[in-house]
Every structure is written in C-alpha cells, then in structure tokens.
Image: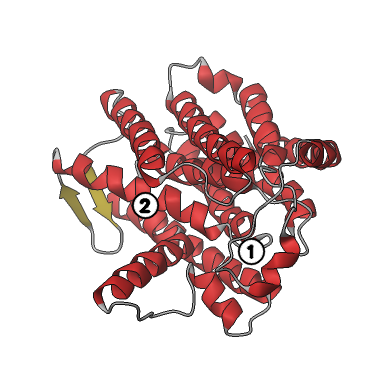
Amino acid sequence: MNTVIIMSMLLTFLLGAVIGPLVLPWLRRLKFGQSILEIGPSWHKSKQGTPSAGGIIFIIPICAVTLILGARSLFSGDYRLLYAMLFILICGAIGFIDDFTKFTHKQNKGLNVRQKTIMLAGAITLYVAAMYFSGYVTTDVYIPFFNVSLHLSYFYFILIIPFLFFFVNSVNLTDGLDGLAASVTLPYAAAFIFVALVFNAAGKGNEGLAVLAASTVGGLFAFLIYNFHPAKVFMGDTGSLFLGGLVAALAMSYDMPYFILVGGIVYLIEGLSVVLQVTYFKLTHGKRIFKMTPIHHHFEMCGWKEVTIVAVFTAVSALACIAALWGIIYQALYFI
C-alpha cells in the first residue's frame, strides 16, 4: 500500500501542476472572475477579476487518480469509496452551480440560502443513509480519552446531518484568503493516510480510501502553486464545497465523526465565528464581537498579513490532526 500512496501523491501533484496553466487562460476566456464584496477588506479589491472556480485544478487529478489507482476497491464489495466519491462530487457540483450563478449574474452572491441548504442537506442525508444501511457507520459515537461510547440510536441522525452540514459549510467559509482552505486541509488529508495505514494493519482497510487521502495531498500541493499568495486563481465554491464533502467523507468512511470535530478545529472556529457574530449582532441591534467574520478576516483587520494567518491556521490544523490521531491510537490500545 505504501507504494500506491506515494504514487497517488506524485501523480496527482504532477497532473495538477500540468492542468493549472491550461485551466487559467480557459477561466479568463470564460470571464470566471471573482467579485469582491463591498463590505470586505478594502485591500481585497486588488483581487477583483482573479479567475475563480479553479478548484477543478485539484478536483480532476484527485478524481482521476483515485478512480484509477483505487479501482480495485470499487469492485471489492466495499462501497465506502464509491459512496464517498459520489457524495464529494455532488458537493462539488453544488459549488459549481453556485459559482456559475455568480458569474452569470456578475455578482458575489450565487445560490440563495434556501437553495444551497436544500441541496447540501439532501446530499448529506442520502450519503449518511447509504453508509448506515450498508453497515459502514453505526449510531454509536466513541469519545477518545474518556473510554466512553455513546449509544445514540436514531437520535444519531438528528445530530449527524446538521453536524456534517455545519462542517461542509465551514470549509467553504475558510476559503477566504490566498491558500488558506487548501493549506488547512493538507494536514487533515495527510492524517487520513495514517488512518488508512492503521486500519489496513488491522485488516479493516480500504486501499481506495488511502488513495483518496494521498491524492488529495498531492492535488492541494499542486493547487497551491497557483493559489498561494498572491493567488493567480481561487478555488471558488466548486473547490471549497468539494473539499468540504471530502473532509466529511474521509471521517465518515471510518465511522469517526469525532475526527472532524478535533482535526477540523480550524473549520469549527471559522464557522462558529460567523454564527456568534450574526447572533450577537441581532441580539444587540448592531454590535459585533469580531471586526469581521469569518475570523480570518478579523485577524486581517487587526493587521496580520495573509501569509501569517495562513501559516498560523495551518499549524493549528496540523496540531489538531495530531491530537485527533492520538485519539485513534488511544482507542486502538484501549480495545486491544
């Protein structure tokens, strides 16, 4: 499996690096340029017109390499990879519809809240149902370090669907600075290479899921060639919702929703900052907790440079993923 993992990362990186120069002029010809919100930081105006929907730079390589090198898993009777890929692609398609709507209307707003909510909630519900009825997830939730397993029964579904919905959207919110969403997701995807190896050693692995995690690492590194500050292209909702679906699917494929909560701490903070800001604003009739949300903009308004914010948030993501991985090791030792 180690050879397949290395090949997945290298092939996806090379394919993404090659696709980038082809995609950029194509997006410019289609006038898929980013519109900047008036309420955003004034210095973001210089980014107006930068090609968006550039997520296809990593989406195409990740899907191609995963389907080729992980093909054996698709026909092994283990459908976790198939369900994950379908769910991730649906999320990416919703993002593309959102981006396309923005570009055709020449504004920053795409799908309205209701449309986006119905689409994403529907996709998540179908994915969770498929995983549950196929026996890949249970309604028991293990809490690392406390040796506690909560038996939630059908209450599990009342919690897991909004939980996943929140995090898929939070990945989307994290995509607000050059290289931020891709950089923060890199350690998360890398962590699941380790998870795949652990499960494989225990005889419960799925080579295709390992390929998916590895190809995500390679694809995001390739994308950062064009997305790191100053960005030549943005991933758009096409890329960020694809990544949101991927973040959810990797954890759910191993029946470990708690990994999203711990390893995805940056997404959690980004999403909560918006919820807190909006709630406080409404309750106090106009007062704010943060200078601007999502919270990465707050640090911008405090004078932090984009590259500094990206570096700090990525470091936090990496440390959180290490903590989540230790939880897995602790769980494994406990059950031995």
Number of callouts: 2
For this rendering, which residue is in front, 8 or 123? 123
Q: Residue at x 57, y 54 (%)?
A: 185
Residue at label 1? 177
Residue 188 % position (x, y)? 54, 54
Residue 153 higher or lower than 225, as above or below:
above
Q: Around disc 2, counting alpha carbons within 10 Å, would you say few (fewer than 14), some (14 to 19), or many (20 or more)? A: some
Is residue 321 among what the camera can see? yes
- Give the farthest residue toward the bottom: 302
Residue 289 % position (x, y)? 38, 80
For this rendering, which residue is in front, 212 or 202? 212
* Amino acid beneath label 2: Phe
Corner quadrant of residue 156: top left
Residue at label 2? 166
Residue 176 % position (x, y)? 59, 61
For this rendering, which residue is in front, 313 or 319? 313
Q: Residue at x 57, y 19 (%)?
A: 72
